Image: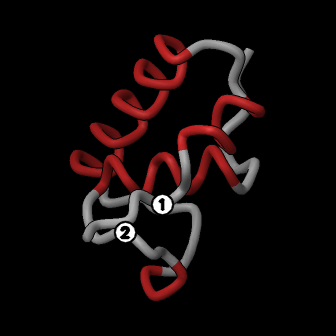
Amino acid sequence: MNVIFPSIDKLLNIVDSKYKLVHVASRRSKQMLENKHFQMKQEEYVNKKELGRALEEVEKGLITIK
């Protein structure tokens, strides 16, 4: 069984809308793919793919959502 990390419940306590969360994570993951710029060390991420890593950055407060 695959466990999704971070959980959607935790993320929705940070971001008030699923749609906003998807938008922010999508934009951030594209930035990661294009620029290879990560806010944490590679080994600190739980996820291997950029979308999951973007969600981890949201959970850790590294991305500010206005």
Disc 1 target residue: 5
**Residue 64 point in image, percent of width and height:** 73, 32
**Residue 29 point in image, percent of width and height:** 34, 42
Residue 47 badge: 2
Q: Which amino acid, by three-letter code, is at mark 1?
A: Phe
Q: Which amino acid, by three-letter code, is at mark 2?
A: Asn
Question: What is the number of callouts on the image?
Answer: 2
Residue occupying the point 57% across, 71% down: 40
Residue 51 badge: none
Image quadrant occupied by the N terminus: bottom left
Residue occupying the point 40% across, 57% down: 4
Counting other residues with Cα less than 10 Å from the Cα at mark 1, is it few (<14), some (14-19), or many (20 or more)?
A: some
Residue at the front extreme, as displayed: 1
Q: In this rendering, which labeled residue sits more in front, label 1 or label 2?
A: 1
- Which quadrant would residue 3 be assigned to in this image? bottom left
- Cβ–Cβ below 8 Å for labels 1 and 2? yes
Image quadrant occupied by the C terminus: top right
